[in-house]
Image (cartoon, grey):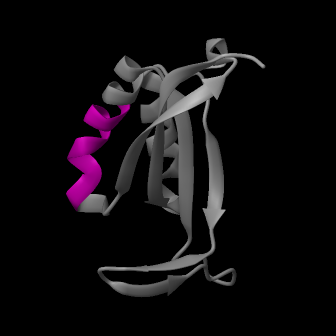
Amino acid sequence: MNASIERVKVEILLDAPLCDLVTRMVEEAGAGGYTILLALGGSGRNGRWREDRVTGADTKLLLLAVAADDIAEAIVRGLEPLLDSYRLIVMTTRVGVVRGDKF
């Protein structure tokens, strides 16, 4: 079995209209890649929400990136000014990845 290497997974829950801005910030921080997933619904401080495929008014996305410590820190630092204004949710987790050279 291949040995794993420690990296940081950054998860960002965002409103769909912010996708271009947030992906640009992730790229500028030096992340080599990311994945964007459609979030179908959830519940939080402002109550329940559900993705509305007719209007897209409440469409939320989950951006996942796995990166080295310094890049993950740069992503979070870059997003800090947006946290209050745009209600982003940013989570970081230490993960072990196989083929660490990809991240």
> Where in the figure is residue 66, as x and y percent of width and height?
54, 31
- Residue 22 shown left or right of residue 90 in the figure: right
Q: Is residue 60 magenta?
A: no
Query: Which residue appears at 44% of the width and 87% of the height?
Result: 48
| Predominant SS of the magenta segment | helix
Query: Which residue appears at 32% of the width and 28% of the height?
Result: 73
Quadrant in the picture for the N terminus: top right
Question: Which quadrant holds residue 89?
Answer: bottom left
Query: Which residue appears at 56% of the width and 44% of the height?
Result: 64
Q: Is residue 34 above or below residue 4?
A: below
Considering depth in this image, is 53 or 68 the residue closer to the camera? 68
> Where in the figure is residue 80, as x and y percent of width and height?
24, 43
Residue 57 seen in the figure: no
Considering depth in this image, is 71 or 26 the residue closer to the camera? 71
Query: Which residue appears at 46% of the width and 58% of the height?
Result: 13
Considering depth in this image, is 28 or 50 the residue closer to the camera? 50
Magenta stretch in the rendered image:
75-84
Q: Is residue 58 above or below residue 84?
A: below
Residue 63 seen in the figure: yes
> Where in the figure is residue 50, as x and y percent of width and height?
56, 83
Question: Which quadrant holds residue 96?
Answer: top right
Q: In this view, does 73 lie above or below 92?
A: above
Quadrant in the picture for the C terminus: top right
Q: Is residue 81 magenta?
A: yes
